[in-house]
Image (cartoon, rainbow, N blue to C red):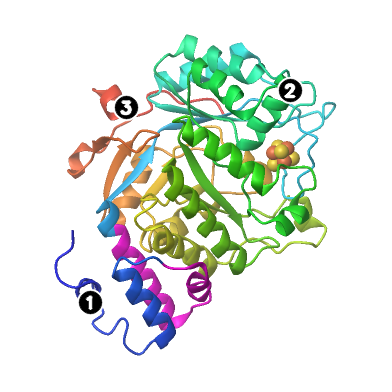
């Protein structure tokens, strides 16, 4: 808990006139946030438009709420992405990842190959595999369960974080069962948690522009809440900076907050900036080229303020933002660096240029550079090791205690 009044705490952090001299309407909202009161979607909409002194105050207040919620630790997880197929005919207009069956770079990994990748990741210190794929037109419904079983039989302790709500919808359809029964069969096979992807913007009109064939907002919410009620935690996401705007962002985050009040099943919120370079909706002139720097900063800060007391973890996507912008977002409300992401292909297909793997030491360097403390966590945000002492930073070569430190020992193939 903080000492003194909320405003006092912000004043201590550097600018004694932080809320003085800024627009009264913005000052009132930020004061309410510092008093730990809930911010409405309309108030959030005002925050999404700030600049100058108001922007500086927004970031400072978000940083203060982050400090109260989770302290000075910045977490990360050692994870391998497994995109088991890129074959998909859904036709999402923002997607540069999907391929057709006869495309030369179409890919469908065998169960053995998936298990091999999971085992390699475990040997390298990963605690999680994050597995998602396209909606292959002839995929049997039980393939999703078989994928989990293949991993768990080979690496029983690996956390399997897998399948977007759209894949759950598809698998349930293909299996002829309802969502709860389908999720129960996956949980029984060893599913640990679901990525809250395929949310994009939970707004009917925006979704219609992004894709005609994807699940609706209502279906996304139904699948997520069904999972939560079955004690299957999920992440939550937003994909922003295409044909959307601040009104959609405020309403989207407000909806996620309502779900969290009801179920408590979200572990984190991950803002995902639209990567436009190879996306059809950008190439045909319908979408703008992703969020601006200011929008990225405001998104993480407003999310922290809106979700305060409900979702404690706001993650930066370093793959989409790049390391420097990610650091700035961590100084304006965010607290988690996400995963080391061996084999990240979805953002890379869309044209992101920030790499597909990052070493824990690099996370440590970036976290220490902003005066914070690195910590390795598992998927469910249990801290595995807090690196209070700079001398305990993980080493790749000749490291002893690798399992404790969860440091990759071998270089994984791309
Ligand atoms: S976003 Fe997913 S569902 Fe949509 S086209 Fe790409 S792979 Fe298919």
The magenta stretch is: 39-66
Horizontal and vertical percent position of residue 163: 59, 31
Q: Nearer the viewer, mark 1 or mark 3?
A: 1
Between 285 and 71, the one nearer to me in the picture: 71
Q: Is residue 50 magenta?
A: yes
Q: What residue does disc 2 label?
A: 174
CA–CA distance in space, label 2 to label 1: 57 Å
State the mark number for residue 251: none
Crowdedness near tag 3: few (<14), some (14–19) or many (≥20) residues, C-alpha within 10 Å: few
Circle 1 residue: 11
Q: Is residue 72 above or below residue 396?
A: below
* Residue 3, above or below 344: below
Q: Residues within 10 Å of mark 1 (few under 14, many from 20)?
A: some
Magenta span includes 388: no
Residue 213 image position (x, y, % from top left): 79, 42
Q: Residue at x 48, y 42 (%)?
A: 235
What residue sits right under mark 3 in the picture?
A: 397
Ligand 1 placement by image quarter? top right
Which residue is most to the left? 3
Pick whichever of labels 2 and 3 is earlier in the sequence: 2
Q: Residue at x 27, y 85 (%)?
A: 17
């Amino acid at each position: 808990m903080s000492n003194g009044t909320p405003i006092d705490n912000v004043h201590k952090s550097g600018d004694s006139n932080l809320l003085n001299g800024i627009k009264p309407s913005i000052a009132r909202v930020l004061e309410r946030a510092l008093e730990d009161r809930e911010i409405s979607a309309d108030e959030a909409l005002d925050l999404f438009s700030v600049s100058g002194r108001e922007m500086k105050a927004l970031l400072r207040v978000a940083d203060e709420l982050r400090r109260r919620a989770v302290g000075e630790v910045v977490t990360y997880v050692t994870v391998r992405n497994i995109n088991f197929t890129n074959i998909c005919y859904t036709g999402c207009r923002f997607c540069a990842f999907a391929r057709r069956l006869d495309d030369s770079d179409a890919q469908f990994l065998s169960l053995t190959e998936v298990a091999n990748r999971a085992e390699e990741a475990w040997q390298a210190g990963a605690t999680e595999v994050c597995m998602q794929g396209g909606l292959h037109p002839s995929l049997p419904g039980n393939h999703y369960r078989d994928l989990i079983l293949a991993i768990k039989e080979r690496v029983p302790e690996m956390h399997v974080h897998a399948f977007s709500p759209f894949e759950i919808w598809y698998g349930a359809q293909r299996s002829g069962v309802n969502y709860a029964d389908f999720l129960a069969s996956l949980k029984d096979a060893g599913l640990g948690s679901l990525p809250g992807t395929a949310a994009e913007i939970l707004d009917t009109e925006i979704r219609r522009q992004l894709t005609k064939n994807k699940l609706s907002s209502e279906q996304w919410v139904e699948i997520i809440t069904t999972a939560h009620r079955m004690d299957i935690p999920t992440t939550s996401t937003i994909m922003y900076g295409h044909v959307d705007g601040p009104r959609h962002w405020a309403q989207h985050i407000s909806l996620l907050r309502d779900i969290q009040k009801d179920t408590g099943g979200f572990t984190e919120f991950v803002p995902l900036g639209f990567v436009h370079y190879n996306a059809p909706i950008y190439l045909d002139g319908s979408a703008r080229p992703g969020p601006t720097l200011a929008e990225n900063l405001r998104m993480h800060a407003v999310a922290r303020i809106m979700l305060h007391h409900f979702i404690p973890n706001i993650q930066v996507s370093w793959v989409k933002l790049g390391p420097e912008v990610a650091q700035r977002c961590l100084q304006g409300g965010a607290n988690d660096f996400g995963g080391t992401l061996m084999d990240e292909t979805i953002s890379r297909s869309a044209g992101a240029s920030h790499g597909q793997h990052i070493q824990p030491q690099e996370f440590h360097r970036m976290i220490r550079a902003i005066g914070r403390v690195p910590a390795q966590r598992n998927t469910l945000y249990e801290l595995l090791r807090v690196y209070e002492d700079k001398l305990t930073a993980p080493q790749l070569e000749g490291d002893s205690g690798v399992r404790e430190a969860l440091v990759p020992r071998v270089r994984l193939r791309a």
